[in-house]
Each structure stands twice: as C-alpha cells, then as structure tokens.
Image (tube, rainbow, N blue to C red):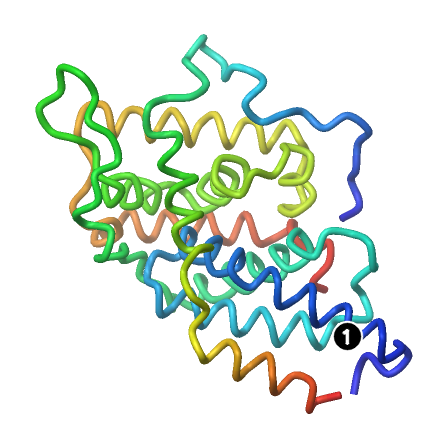
Amino acid sequence: MTSRTANPTPPGGDRPAGGRVARPEWADGLRQLYDSVVDEPLPDSFRDLLAKLDAQG
Amino acid sequence: MEGSDRTACEKADFKRELTEVVPHLRAFARGLCGRPDMADDLVQETLLKAWAAQDRFQPGTSMRAWTFVILRNAYLTDMRRNRFRGDYDESLAERVLTAPAGQEQPIHLSDLHRALLTLPPERREALLLVGAGGFSYEEAAAICGCAVGTIKSRVGRARAALNAMLEDGSVPQRSLDDAAAHRAILEELDHVAAGHGVAAAS
C-alpha cells in the first residue's frame, strides 16, 4: 500500500473511452456475485482455522 | 514464531479484523477462480500467510486491502502452477440477472460469471476490485501494484469485453477448455506476476 493519492476517484464517476455507457445492465450483477458470497454463512473449516491461529502464538 | 513483538491486545485486534474480512476474501477468491472449493482453499492459504506476516500489517490501514494483496499473489502463483481450471460456479446457473427489454434470452448470473472467467486475469481482478468489491481506482491500483491509469484501462477493457459477450450472447459455455486460450492466459499471468503486486505480501 504505497501509492496513495489524496483524491480517490469514484469508480462510477467517469466514462470509459469511446463514450460507452459506464454502467451497463449487468453491472449490478458483479455486486450481486460478490455480495452473495459475503452473505453466505461461514463454513466451519474457517472457524476451525481461525481458532487454530491463536494456538500458533 | 513471528509476531512476538506485538502486544496481546494488538494481536487480538489483528485477529478480529482478519476474521471480519474472511467473507470478503471468499467473495474475491470466488470471482477470481470460479470454483467455490478452490476459492476457499485459496482463502485458507491467505489467512495462514496473513497471520504469519502480521508484523507487516500497519494497524489503522485497510485489512481488506492488505489481505487482498496476499490473496491475489497466492492466486497468481497457484494459477501458474495450473491448479485452477477456471470452472464456473454451477450453483449460479439458474439465477436470472437481468432480462433486457426486447431480448428473448435473459442474462443469467452464471453467464456473467463465465464471461468474467474468460477475461485475462489482470482485467478480471481489476473489474472485481472496482466493480464488485467497491474499491476506488486508487485502492485497486495499490492492491495490484500498478498505476491508477493502468487500472482504469483494465477496468474499461474488461467492461467492454463483458458488454460484447453479454449483449450479443456469445458467452462461452465453458471458459477455459480452449488450450490456446489457456496458454495465452498463463503467458499473461507470467507478465502480471513478474513485476507487480508485492506491496504487502513479500
């Protein structure tokens, strides 16, 4: 994380080259794909792994 | 054991923050490599690496961004070892994403995911970070270890490619069965991995 700038550009705030519409109909689908996984219950294997980390010191 | 010069309180904070980002790591990994089981293996690998490298995490900075760097580097390494085949998530097959007016066939989430998996990896990850993960271009550039303009270009090309595939219905049924396409992707991976993305994980 070395290259920080003071004024982050909002990703939806500009238009790609060629005048193409910035948010096509499928754009929300990317969010849906991502959020559907975020909202899944965490498998036990992750709870087990996280619990073991403490034992490693 | 690493992490010995951190206080117990700092370690507890690290552990809590690491736990909180696991769902996000799973979502990013699923988008990158498609198959849920492989994605979860990648996240477990990432958690172990993050824990071992916790002295390099600066408290107060974004745990999500820091761990995404570790995850993408692990993914690139594993891809070059040909561990991932780019299969898509079967459970998405029936989920309708959108049915554009005047178009007979609706676009399914699975179409979007398959189309995503056909993109060159550096464009796929750029689009995932910005379009799905909600990172700014600047944050995505930091995660990928490249210039902001490069990220903007990759996102633009990724969007254009997905538009083309989704609008004319040319999404491939299987993403990486074509040996030539797969070889081309591996060559691009070598290029991407050669000089980038080592901001936090090495």
Q: Is residue B155 left or right of residue A11?
A: left
Three-letter residue code for mark 1: Ala
* Chain ID at mark 1: B
Image: B50 above or below B187: below
Classify residue B58 by image quadrant.
Answer: bottom right
* x and y percentages locating residue A37 in the rendered image: 41, 55
Residue pictured at 42% horizontal, 32% vertical: B158
Query: In the structure shown, which secondary structural element does the residue marked by tag 1 occupy?
Result: helix
Identify the residue position indicated by label 1 in the image: B12
Residue B150 location in percent, x, y?
A: 60, 31
Q: Position of residue B1 (x, y in %)?
A: 78, 88
**Residue shown at 11% from the left, 29% from the top:** B105
Q: How many marks?
A: 1
In this rendering, would A3 be left or right of B103? right
> Which residue is drawn at the image coordinates 85% and 75% (left, top)?
B9
A7 over A21 or under it: above or below = below
User: Where's residue B40, x and y in %?
Assistant: 43, 69
Q: Quadrant of the C terminus of chain B?
A: bottom right
Residue drawn at 43 percent across, 47 percent down: A34
Question: Measured along the vertical axis of the image, is residue B129 above or below residue B74?
Answer: above
